[in-house]
Structure formats: C-alpha cells, structure tokens
Image (cartoon, grey):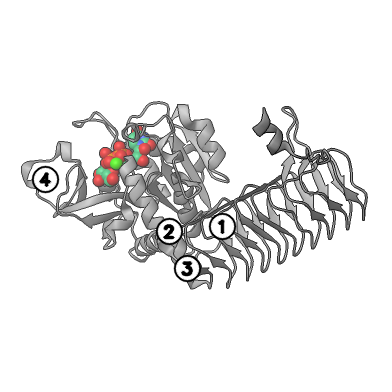
Amino acid sequence: MPTASRTADRPLACIVMAGGKGTRMRSALPKVLHPIWGRPLLGWVIAAVREAGAERVVVVVPPDAAEAVAAVAGDAETVIQHDQLGTGDAVRCAMPPLEGFTGDVLIVSGDTPLLTAELLGGLVDAHVADGAAATAATFQIDQPGSYGRVIRDAAGIRIVEAKDATPAELEVDEVNAGLYVFDADALRPALAGLTNDNAQGEYYLPDVVPAIAAAGGRASASLVDVASLLLGVNTRVELAEAAQIIRDRIIEQHLLAGAGIVDPATTYIDADVELEADCVVHPYTILRGRTRLAAGAEAGPHSVLTDSVLESDAQAGPFAHLRAGTHLHTGARVGAFAETKNTELGARSKIPHLSYVGDATVGEDTNIGAGNITANYDGVNKHRTTIGDRVRTGSDCVFVAPVEVGDDATTGAGSIITEDVPAEALGIARARQVNKEHYAKRKRDV
Ligand code: UD1
Ligand code: CA
C-alpha cells in the first residue's frame, strides 16, 4: 500500500466509527451510504485512510445497516455494534478483529468525507515522532457548541463533553476533532476500564486519553489548522457542502493531470472517472461511474455519460446520453439527442442524431441515419442488433432485434428491419407510396 504522506514504518490499523443512526439526514438510507460523486461517504473515508497507509480497516456499523455497509466497505472488515452505547463502546466492538495487532490504531468517524491522506498521515507521524501512546486531533473554533472541550492543565490532557462541562470549561475554544491515534497495546486496557458515569450515560472514547496517561503512556493533543477538512456530515445541508468541496478537488486533480475541462462550474465528474491528458470535457456535462476518456476524446456540451468509454478522438455530444456499457472506438461519434446503452460503436462510425441504439454492435466506418431505433426489448428479454462495417442505414429505421445487417449493406429510409440484411444488400421494409391524383379537386367538389 503506498504511503504518500506517512514516514513511520510502524504497522497502522484503522477503526471507522459508523455505528450511529444518522437520524438528522431524514432518510431511509444509512448516513454513511449517502453518495458523493458516485462513492458513499464511508468510501471516501476508507479511501483516505488506505492512502494514509492503514493496512487493516475495521468499520463499526449499526445492525440494520450491516449488510449494505459491508457491500461498500470493500476490503475493510465490518463489525456490528448492537446498542449505541457511545464512541468508547464502538471502538471496543472493533477490537476483537484486531486481537494480536501491535502498532498504531487510527480512529476516524465514517461521516467525515473531507479527511485527506496528508492530514491523517501527518497526525500519525506527529504521534510517532512524539513517542505518544495517545494522540487526539484538536482544532480551534469560535462557537464550540456541542464539541468536546480540550482541557490542558497540570494533570495533563483530558476531554470534557459539553454536557458534562463546567461553565469555565465551556469557555475553552480548543475542541476535540473526534480523530485519534492510539498505540494498540495502550488502547486495550484503557477501553476495558471505561465507565459510563457521565451526563449521557455513554462510554466516551475521549476518556481513554487521560486513562492512557494515568497508566504511564504519553498522551498528546495535536492542533490541526485545517479544521475545514474535519467537517462531519449530519444533515443533507452538510452533505451538499462536502460534495461541493470534493467536486472542486476532483476537477482540480484532472486539470493538473492535463485533462481539458472547459467550464468547471458546470461540470460534474464522479470519483472513479478516468480522464487522459488532452481529452476535452465541454460545459454542462456529467461524467458518471467508471467513464473513461482517452486523449483527444471529447464529451459534451450538455451530455451525460455513465460507465462509458471514449477511445482516442471519439466524441459524444452535444446533447448525447451515453448509458452504461457504451464503448466508442477511435474517432467514433454520438451526436445530438442520441442515446446509447450497452453498445459498441466501431472506429469512425457515427450515430449523429435523434437515435436510440441499445444492446448493439456496430462495425467500423458505419453511419446510422437520423432517427434510427433498435427495438431491443420484447417485454421480457433484451436482444442484440449487429450492424457490420461500412453500413449506411436510412433515416428513421427500426431494427427489431435480434437482427443482423452485413458489411457494406444499406437500409432504406423508414424501414422496419425484422430480418437479417445480407452483406452488400439493400434492405427495404416499407409500404410503397401511392399517389391519388386530383385528390384536392375531388375534395372541393363534394
Ligand atoms: C464526539 C466526541 C466529541 C467530539 C466530537 C467531534 C465523544 C463522546 N465525543 O462527539 O468530544 O468533539 O465527536 O465531532 O466521542 N458512534 C458509534 N457508536 C456509538 C456512538 C457514536 O459508532 O455508540 C459513531 C457515530 O456514528 C459517529 C461517531 O461515532 O460517526 C461520533 O459520534 P457522535 O455521536 O457524532 O459524537 P459527538 O457527540 O459528535
Ligand atoms: Ca458528531
């Protein structure tokens, strides 16, 4: 695992506390599963702790979210916290999987998606450099509200929850960030000794800090100056704020890596999108899922691409909708008001306008006429349409799948193609035109 920011070589594990209910989201979806640019909150946290060098990640989840969380946790292990007895209890639940682990344990909340590997790595480095057994990240804030206050006095460092604080303690503006590093061997006995003798009747994780000091370990508090990175998401308002910040970060990373993004203010790019240098994303464009643009490819303006691949010099837009599984080979193009899904479009082939092409394989140098539709769904099953190389389809054709059109074939405008068209043939499937002479006069004379 690359550890871009952490210099220490002590083993690092991480516990992600996500056992809370997240009721303020007013949502049926567990809080840590709310997505930001295609990745759940929890996914952002896990990505940051992995990048910071955590080899083991244990996520604490509530019973009702266990399955859903496990599905997005990837390589991370999950443990269920059956009763929400407090942050100390959450961490206690996470320790059995870490039995026998020696090294440091980084503890974060699952709802802090803005944490960066640099911040976390810096905290772990400070902890190790300090020879500390417990390090709590703190920050300063004008209105400390419900945050735990950091009390530094002759006895050492302790954290007092707002509900337990004296008026004098409430005045303190240095607060607990809820982000910690502990020596695993010092953490275990301190957790075992926690009590819930406090205003909320909860087991408070911050209480392990003075407990470790009392047991002879070194406890320190590390003041973080980029408090904005610690933003916790509790409401949909905060979710939107966090999403905005992450959106800017994603776009900046792509710009610095050489991708052309004409108007960042109207561009939305999911976390796992890949952009090669010298691709271009035009205004009002949304790139979702695992979409990938190669050098010279262009997307937009006004286009939505989901799980799609544009090879070099391919184009989608303006007003194109590329759904999952669309693959445009070199120089291929999907134009205005065209929708594609699960479709392979060969090199230099075009779907220039007003079409729906789904579950199709189209060869090279083929032109799909305006207003073509693949009728791929019979109400029960999806069927494929296969169109060869150098094919010209007339305007307004319907391909009733499964159906195949051979290389160098042509289809007449307005055809409903229900049978295969052999290579080189012209397929026409429409009623012949009949002109009724003198029709206007006959109507006048009645
Ligand atoms: C906690 C700290 C407080 C700190 C603040 C920073 C405690 C007692 N207090 O307060 O000092 O200033 O964070 O944001 O730790 N969780 C569980 N199981 C539980 C309870 C909580 O997994 O039983 C998880 C929550 O899902 C959340 C995290 O722990 O991710 C923090 O819990 P929360 O209730 O938000 O703690 P605060 O009251 O904000
Ligand atoms: Ca909180």
* Res 250 visible: yes
Q: Is residue 51 left or right of residue 402?
A: left
* Discs 1/4, front: 1
* Discs 3/1, front: 3
Report the amino acid beneath label 4: Leu
Q: Earlier in the sequence, mark 1 or mark 2?
A: 2
Residue under label 2:
266
Badge 3 crowding class, 10 Å Cα cut-off, few under 14, some 14 to 19, many 20 or more, is some
Q: Position of residue 230 (x, y in %)?
A: 32, 53
Q: Relative to 330, say whether 157 is above or below.
A: above
Q: Earlier in the sequence, mark 1 or mark 4?
A: 4
Q: Relative to 325, say whether 263 is above or below.
A: below
Q: Who's the residue at 38% across and 64% down the image?
A: 122
Report the amino acid beneath label 3: Val
Q: How many marks?
A: 4
Badge 4 crowding class, 10 Å Cα cut-off, few under 14, some 14 to 19, many 20 or more, is many
Secondary structure beneath dot 3 equals loop
Q: Is residue 199 left or right of residue 119?
A: left
Between the residue at mark 1 and the residue at mark 2, the CA separation in whole angstroms equals 16 Å
| Quadrant location, the C terminus | top right
Q: Residue furthest left?
A: 167
Residue under label 3:
262
Between the residue at mark 4 and the residue at mark 3, the CA separation in whole angstroms equals 49 Å
Q: Who's the residue at 58% across and 69% down the image?
A: 279
Choose between 97 and 340: the one closer to the eye: 340
Report the amino acid beneath label 2: Thr
Q: For ligand 1, tell me if the residue under mark 3 lies within 8 Å.
A: no
Q: Who's the residue at 81% across and 41% down the image?
A: 433
Q: Earlier in the sequence, mark 4 or mark 3?
A: 4
Residue under label 1:
273
